[in-house]
Amino acid sequence: MENKGLFLDRGIVLTIIVLCVIPFLLQNSFHYEIAIMCMLNAVICIGLNMLVGYTGQISLGHGAFAGLGAYVAVILSTTYSFDPVLSILIASVVLAIIAYFISKPILKLEGHYLAMGTLAVGIIISIVLTNEDHLTGGPDGMGVSSFHILGYVFENDIQWYVLSAIFLVFSIWALQNVVNSPFGRILRCIRDSETAAKAIGADVPYYKTYVFVISVVIATVAGSLYSYYTGFISPEESGFMRSIELVVMIVFGGLGRIYGAVIGAIIITALPQFLTFLHDYEHMVFGAIIIFVMIFMPKGIVSIFDVLKYEKKKEIKKDNS
Amino acid sequence: MVELLQYSFGGLTVGFIYALVGLGFTVIYNSSKIINFSQGEFVMIGGMAAVFLSYADFPFILAFPMAIMLASLLGYVLFKLVSLSSNSSVTSLIILTLGYSIFVRGSSQVGFDKQMHTLPSFISDTPISIFGATITPQAILVIVVSLCIVFTLYYMFNKTKLGKAMLATADNKDAAKLVGISVKKILIMNFMISASIAAIGGIVLTPITSMNYEIGIMLGLKGFCAAIIGGIGNPFGAVFGGVLLGILESFVAGYISSEYKDAVAFIVLLLILFFFPGGLFGAKKSTRV
Amino acid sequence: MKKMMRIILGLFILGFTMTVVAKDNIKIGALVAATGPASFLGDPELKTLELYVNKINASGGILGKKLELISYDTGANPKKATTFVKRLINQDEVVAIIGGSASGETMAILPFIRKAKIPLVSMAGSIKIVKPVKKFVFKTPATDRMACQKIFEFLKDQKKTNVALISGNGGFGKSMRGQCKDVASDYGIKIVADETYGPKDTDMTSQLTKIKSMSNVQAVVNPGFGQGPAIVTKNFKQLGMTQTLVQSHGVASKKFIELAGNAAEGVIVASPPVVVADLLENSNPIKKIALDYIKDYEGKYNAPVSTFGGYAYDALNLVVEGIKKANSTEPKKIRDAIESTTNYVGLNGLFTMTKKDHLGLDIDSGIKMLVIKNGTWALAE
């Protein structure tokens, strides 16, 4: 399971292969939309997982940061005609600063209090975005300008797919490097016992803030890209339900597991599309699925693979003895 | 002066509903350390069931207890689900109760409907005027019922053996087991009581605000704020927190701006979390290392 | 292990590509907010669409083929709407789309409609949907601007020109509030107060107390829909306010009277004609189809009709008539036919579309000023 060196390991190579194969299975623009949404959600989840899964800081307000970041970028490029890439950069800086200042008092809280604190921050942000309609277009949202990098316009599905895929692979790679480094080990120490981390001399608040800011910036970039792709943004992107959706994704997939975030994002993003035939029963079934997974697979879907691996190991041991 | 009084009346009415929801949270939290994100849905179920039973020509005297029983049954189901879940990490339990709230809302969509419904005022419609400000009899009923529930719980916890057993379980499960308390039965009762309290709130609320399958979301969140403001774990703190919240909201809408009224609950929550981490009446926290 | 992932992934993709064997049906798409904050609108809309598609099919369909309604629930969420509109256009290959229920989601899907060149008939209120006019986009409800104009005209006639606004701050309420402020001076109306409330709020006495304390208010107008206006009405009565209270077309349904109870007495409501079918003059062509609609809808669903169901009915008929007129299922031809609609008698009024006007609603036929008397509707003008 140890990855060799800084570059490609089995998981990433496989991911790249899968991402290259998928376009041949996608038949129309709708399929592409789902794929792109899955990938961008996966990126946000990777960031969130770093905060929640690896550092143990529950955040029920992440959707608000993703939405706020996207709004900043989109307003800059649509209302003020900034270059989109510059807009995203500025948005990242702005959100990083906001996240930094919010993290100082918020991350002092623990457990349920942290959950409620992040929830409260998220809802306040979302209310502001809804009410300041002269800037944000209000509850009905606003249209978004087109996206281009140095003049190269992104207007068809394949371009967006490639962009999102590159972003996803990069995020997985980056997270893997963080996780397997001393920095990552301290994060996990903080998750398991903050007191122990302090006892070995780690500056716990610094690490928590660092991770919080990074996860917010990742969410800003991915959220902005998604708004550019759809050409529209609305306050629902920053709402309570969106924040909950993101947390469900990472818990469902597997907290503290790199591919857990990715798998969770894919399933929760795509699942509603399969449930549409249920019409009115859709929400009931969706809730039931969440309950089922939380009871029987509390470590997430990824834990299925653990079981399989364990069984395989048992087999090998048996053969060898 | 009249305005001040009027804002207070409006705030009291909704504040006691927040108080009931917060109280329900606290009862469950005390015994099982679980934050029940589906608490608001019990309020909704209480109201919707009461409405539909009365459509089916059940008189109130039957419909209301039946609605409460339905809600407490749902509380029992939640308990079962929680006890089935093997991993008791904070995050997965939160997601479990969230999933349950989605499930209950979805079931209400199908089992009841998506329209809005109301019940006639239980006493009368004529507003009562006090020093120039008005309050409806239904609102007074809400306050009275809430206070009754609070005092009943107080009496139960402090003066009855059962209540003492509940407090013991909340304090230290293992010790409670050692002295022969059936912890499981206590937990079940707590869940059912919590759901029933919420359902009663939903029933008395319906004539004032009307009822639909979605009201649980915001009510749950604000009730939660109330519980934390008062100090989660302290039932009277939850009540105080709820009333305080209702009145603050009302004052902000009246004296400052009505646009940011919803934000009040959450801003106050943050202030309390930062400056009074245990809530206004919560105990000082100490952690096992 | 990773192989398993690929297999599962493959199955997922397979699931997408599985389509029912294509029958020779005419597919009409619908984006409806059946759940969520606008379900008060979407629920009757969807029910109406289903009811009438079945009815049309029962009498043989159109152009000899059956209609197939493919509807998705957007929850009034613009993001979901953009996903589902793509599904309708690219996967389900519909020839026309009815929806969204709300303005936000409608605006979000416009770029996709334009690209796909498929006609859209929206059931949402904002004037921005058809102004500036977009080639493939039509709508059936009166605009919020029209409602404001009709209300202010009425108030001006009553010489009640000092108006206080109290609006819900959801999309509908906010948009109508903006339009009302914009047209007020055209009717000599002065907006002396501008309060708002959240769509889920349970008590508006604070805002109303502020209005009550002002000495010059003659009328109070309440843009909004859902439970908010009912609570405003009840609070209004509780506070003993005596000004004229005017509700918007967002609450034109018996449900509002039910929710507001006794407090609804004397309240003025701007309403599309379908709600008061029995009060229309016999010479009004809308009367018959409205009575038929009420019979069909209330007979099947045992719930009072609302204007929202009316929007869906008109939208569906515009599409169906368009298909018949064009004698083709080609989206472009359907669009042309819809644009040439003349004197269509709808539940919401008389429609005549032109190249420049994709609403085409005659405002006098489209909005009636009603007053609630003895727990039921009466004409106010």
Image (cartoon, coloured by chain):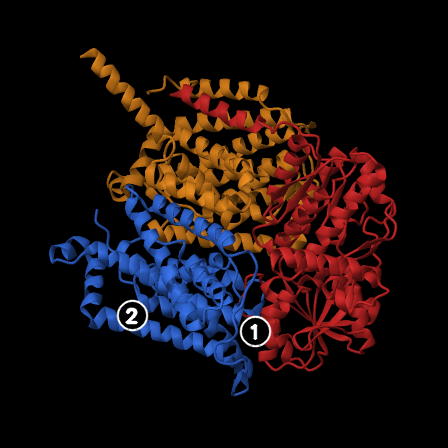
As shown in the figure, which amino acid type bears the numbered disc 1?
Ser
Position of A194 with respect to C144 (left or right) is left
Position of residue C110 measured from the top left corner of the image (x, y, whole percent): 72, 41
Name of the residue lying farthest toward the front: C59
Query: Which secondary structure, mark 2?
Result: helix
**Which quadrant, please, contains the C terminus of chain A?**
top left
Above or below C273: residue A68:
above
Position of C282 with respect to B285 (left or right) is right
Query: Which residue is disc 2 drawn over?
Result: B153
Query: Which residue is disc 1 drawn over?
Result: C206
Query: Which secondary structure, mark 1?
Result: helix
Q: Nearer the viewer, residue C307 or C288?
A: C288
Say which chain tag 2 marks. Answer: B
Position of C306 with respect to A64 (left or right) is right
The colour chain A appears in is: orange
Q: What residue appears at the point 35 percent right and 29 percent down from the top-left corner?
A: A304
Label of residue C151 in the image: none
Depth check, mark 2 against mark 1: the one in front is 2
Picture quadrant where residue A52 is located: top left
Q: Which chain is red?
A: C
Position of residue B264 measured from the top left corner of the image (x, y, whole percent): 49, 63
Q: Which chain is blue?
A: B
